[in-house]
Each structure stands twice: as C-alpha cells, then as structure tokens.
C-alpha cells in the first residue's frame, strides 16, 4: 500500500475531530485526555494463559461478619465456606498477599466488604514525597505499594528484569461466595487503583467485585498471563478493568458498569500479528459506561460472545493516543457480540455540573457516569485508526448514530511525525456477515446508519451483512465488497464534511433538530 498521499487530502472533519479529541478533549475541558502510564514493555511472550486451580498452598481471608454473610448461601457452598472460616488468619487481602511464601498460592476471600484499612494509613515520609505524582515507576510501587493501590501484587523482584520471579507468581485470588457481589473490595475513592497486578505473571482473579476507584478497579500491567474471571468492576472514575502491555490474557464472564472511561480496556496488548490471540474477551457484559470496550493499540485481541449495551459508545479500538506500545492498532477480531442501544448521553452530567463534585458525591450508585474521554454517542463499534481487524457475525442494533464506524487516525495524533506514516491507518479491515438494525428476537431496531466510512485507506471491505430492511444502509452508499476489496489507497473523501460524528457529547437529536 502507498502511504505517500498528499498531506492536504483526506483531512475531513472526522480526522480533525479525532485530532481535537486528543489535543483538546472536546466536551471535556480540564479532564484527563487519555490513559497515561509509565514507559512499559510488552512481555516476551514465553508465558501462557493461567488455568483456574482448586489445589495448592492456601491462605484464607475473612471479616468479623463473614459467618453471618454465609447464611444465605446454598447449602453446599455455605458448608464449604464454614470449613474455610475456621482456617481464616487474615482480615485484609493485602495482608494475605504480603504473607505469601511460594508461587502458586491461592488466597480465598470469604464474603464481606474489604476496605483494606491498613492500606489507608499515612505513608512513610519517603513515600509521602511521591504523593503528588500521577505516574510512578515500578520501583516506586515496590517501595510504596499502597501509595496509589489499595491492594498491590508486585511480582518482579529486586532484579527489576520486568518478569515475575518470586513468591507472587501464579497467584490466585478468589471470592468464595455465590457471586461477585458477595465479596466486595471497596476503594471508596481513596486510591487510584483498587487492585494492581504489576509484572505478576500467571495471576488469576475470580468471583469478586471491585468498586469506587479514582482510576481503575483492576489494573494488570506488564504481565504475561492473567485471567479476570467472573469479576464485577463498577463506579470508577475511569476503568472497570484495565490491562496494559500484557500478553496471554483472558477476560471471561466479567461485568462492568458505571465507569467514566471504558468498562473493559485491553490496551497495548502484545502485537503478535494474528499468529495467536494475545488477549481473549468472552462472555462479558459491559454497560452503562462511557465506552463498553476500548483498546488503544488493542492488538491481537479476540472479543467474542459478549454484550455491550447502553453505553455512550459500545466498542472502540484506536490508534489515537501517544505513548502506547504497539501502535498503530491491528489484528483484532470482534465476533458474535451483541451491540445495542449505545445511546447514553452521560455528557449531560458534565454539562449540568454533577461531575465537578468530589467523586464520592456524584451519585455513581444512582446511575451517574462522568465521562473522561470524548466519545461519539450513539455508536456501536468504532475503529478509529486500525488495520487488519475483522468485525463478523455480530448483532448490532438501535445505535442512533451508526452501527459501525471506520475512520482514519492521522499519525500526528499519536505523536508520530514521520511524513511517510501519516496515512498508515486504516487498512485491510473486514466487516462480514453482521446483522444490522435487527434484534435477535426478530424485531426491527435500526441504526442511524449501519456502516459509516471516511473512505480513507486500502483493502477495507464489507460483505454478506444483512439487515431488517432491504439491505444495510451505509455512507458512502456503495462499499467495497470483500470479493473485490478496494486495494488502491484512497486518502479519504474531502467532500464528506458532515459525517454522523462530532465528538461533542450530545445525545440523540430531538425530532425537531433531526428534521
């Protein structure tokens, strides 16, 4: 493909809006503009996806009221928890993490609410000096594990070789209740992260809730091998679940809602180019967030059999933001997902001043979401500068702006100023056999437009998609077929000055404004 088209062509309003979203955070004055983290490296890839274990060294955590909380459990589960209660030696999860002596340990957490009070104690003077810094290096976290983290699992030892090499490798932390809400880890907005797993290769997290974080419910970073299994992440200022610069990951059976950025965010996943999946996201439900799913540099991710609904935007992957390993984004597969009614205008809580209040006073538990990223309200799936992605066999309905959107992300948006790379997105994306504007029960629930494309790129194609209408709607009206994809590079349509996206944060137009 050619990436040497004249710079002046293709700068449609959509591309300009993408740049503005990065540089000025349209509709979000004064807010965080993107996820920022210390310089990271993706693991070597020598690991594997961890498998749930029922045996091995075990530590038990409980609360004084855990015995009472066992009473509503089903008989067998109540009896099993009763036996564990007699083995409980810890009141706080961090204390159990600190007591681990060998790899492969399981920490079993009995029903209760865990606020981790010791993690809230005033930091030592050396740590207090770091309190004003948003970004800390790994060694800073080792010296001050609870400065930003309610619970910290730091697997790399003093050698700092970016790999787990000690007692915390293959750690499993599991709630023992009937469901995630029986074990609640509550950050109460006192820390950036409820739980941080840093270079913690093989970590397996299962069956509990994380809530009320200033940044992220669960944060997995520079880790080779992780599982987020039946977790609930809710009511955070930014992310329910964030994984970054990691490989061999699995999200399964999770749920996320009430988060100011994305419910699920597998960003900067290992770029293995489609040879295998770096991260798999399956059987999860992400709803009532600004973004149900997001992934800057979400490479080699397989997202299948999930539900994304009643977010501002259902799913997004992009190449917009700088300092993310693996850019430009490539090789994700979005398959057999249900993506519907992503029309929530949470930006109204910024317009009316609700989001100016302290986090604990905003009313997240009552349904308030305070967006921390610009998002095209009313969009099902957005690919904002990605290559070689496949969108197939999804049900996509009732998204008032667009079912799917494919658009160019100019390289300068991510800080890449090499002129030869200006047009290095979006190429080779395929939209195949999706059901558009049609609910699974057979009801007609149209999207504003089924497929929208800014016409930039090469080898993008659409085939075998169906709708409840005569045929899927699109802008442009004619799209390249996957039987004969448009192989020649196009810099985009400079006349397309009014795409169905403005990143303004406004919701579904009224009948008057739409007429």
Image: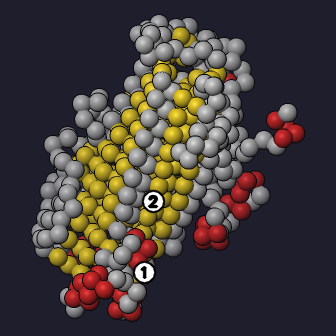
Where 470 falls versus 206 (above or below)?
Answer: above
Q: Which of 480 and 151 is in front in this view?
A: 480
Q: Could you give the CA–CA distance between mark 1 and mark 2, rounded to whole angstroms? A: 19 Å
Tell me what residue is drawn at x 43 percent, y 68 percent. 210
Look at the image and tell me in which quarter the N terminus lies: top left
Q: Nearer the viewer, residue 200 or 453?
A: 453
Look at the image and tell me in which quarter the C terminus lies: top right
**Could you tell whether 515 is left or right of 12 in the image?**
right
**Could you tell whether 460 is left or right of 197 in the image?**
right
Q: Position of residue 422 (x, y in %)?
A: 49, 18
Q: In the structure shown, which secondary structural element does the residue marked by tag 2 occupy?
A: strand
List the residue tagged with mark 2.
255
Where 52 falls versus 436 (above or below)?
Answer: below
Query: Which color scheme does this rendered protein use?
Result: secondary structure
- Within 10 angstroms of label 2, few (less than 14), some, or many (20 or more) residues? many
List the residue tagged with mark 1.
113
Q: In the structure shown, which secondary structural element does the residue marked by tag 1 occupy?
A: strand
Tell me what residue is drawn at x 36 percent, y 75 percent. 178
Q: Where is residue 452 in the image (x, y as percent from the top left)?
A: 60, 26
Q: Position of residue 208 (x, y in %)?
A: 38, 70
Q: Which residue lies furthest to the front in this view?
A: 442
Q: In which quarter of the image is residue 24?
A: top right
Q: Which of 290 and 351 is in front in this view?
A: 290
Whether residue 368 is visible to the viewer of this picture, yes or no, is yes
Tell me what residue is drawn at x 27 percent, y 32 percent. 272
Q: Earlier in the sequence, mark 1 or mark 2?
A: 1
């Amino acid at each position: 493909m050619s990436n040497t088209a004249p710079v002046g062509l293709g700068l449609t309003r959509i591309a300009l809006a993408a740049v503005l979203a990065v540089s000025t955070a349209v509709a979000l004055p004064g807010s965080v503009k993107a996820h920022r983290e210390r310089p990271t490296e993706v693991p070597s890839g020598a690991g594997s996806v961890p498998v749930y274990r029922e045996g091995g060294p075990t530590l038990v955590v409980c609360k004084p009221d855990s015995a009472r909380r066992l009473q509503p459990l089903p008989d067998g589960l109540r009896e099993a928890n009763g036996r564990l209660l007699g083995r409980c030696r810890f009141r706080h999860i961090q204390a159990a993490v600190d007591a681990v002596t060998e790899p492969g340990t399981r920490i079993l957490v009995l029903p209760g609410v865990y606020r981790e009070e010791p993690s809230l104690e005033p930091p030592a003077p050396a740590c207090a000096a770091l309190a004003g810094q948003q970004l800390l290096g790994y060694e800073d976290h080792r010296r001050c594990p609870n400065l930003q983290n309610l619970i910290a699992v730091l697997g790399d030892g003093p050698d700092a070789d970016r790999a787990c090499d000690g007692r915390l490798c293959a750690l499993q932390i599991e709630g023992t209740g009937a469901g995630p809400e029986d074990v609640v880890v509550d950050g109460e907005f006192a820390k950036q992260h409820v739980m941080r797993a840093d270079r913690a290769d093989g970590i397996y997290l299962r069956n509990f809730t994380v809530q009320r974080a200033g940044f992220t419910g669960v944060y997995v970073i520079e880790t080779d091998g992780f599982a987020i299994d039946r977790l609930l992440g809710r009511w955070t200022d930014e992310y329910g679940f964030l994984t970054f610069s990691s490989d061999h990951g699995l999200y399964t059976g999770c749920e996320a809602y009430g988060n100011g950025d994305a419910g699920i965010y597998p960003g900067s996943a290992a770029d293995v180019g489609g040879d295998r999946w770096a991260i798999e996201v399956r059987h999860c439900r992400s709803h009532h967030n600004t973004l149900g799913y997001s992934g800057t540099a979400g490479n080699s991710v397989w997202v299948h059999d999930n539900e994304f609904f009643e977010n501002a935007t259902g799913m997004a992957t992009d190449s917009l933001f700088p300092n993310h390993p693996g850019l430009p984004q490539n090789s994700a597969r979005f398959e057999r997902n249900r993506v519907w009614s992503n029309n929530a205008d949470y930006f109204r809580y910024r317009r009316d001043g609700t989001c100016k209040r302290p986090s604990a006073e905003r009313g997240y538990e009552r349904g308030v979401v305070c967006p921390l990223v610009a998002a095209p309200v009313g969009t099902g799936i957005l690919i904002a500068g990605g290559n070689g992605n496949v969108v197939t066999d999804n049900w996509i309905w009732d998204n008032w702006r667009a079912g799917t959107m494919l658009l160019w992300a100019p390289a300068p948006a991510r800080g890449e100023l090499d002129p030869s790379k200006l047009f290095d997105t979006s190429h080779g994306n395929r939209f195949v056999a999706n059901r558009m504007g049609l609910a699974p029960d057979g009801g007609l629930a149209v999207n504003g437009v089924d497929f929208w494309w800014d016409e930039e790129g090469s080898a993008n194609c659409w085939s075998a998609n169906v709708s409840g209408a005569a045929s899927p709607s699109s802008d442009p009206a004619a799209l390249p077929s996957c039987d004969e994809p448009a192989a020649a590079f196009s810099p985009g349509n400079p006349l397309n000055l009014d795409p169905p996206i403005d990143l303004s944060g406004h919701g579904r137009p009224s009948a008057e404004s739409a007429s």
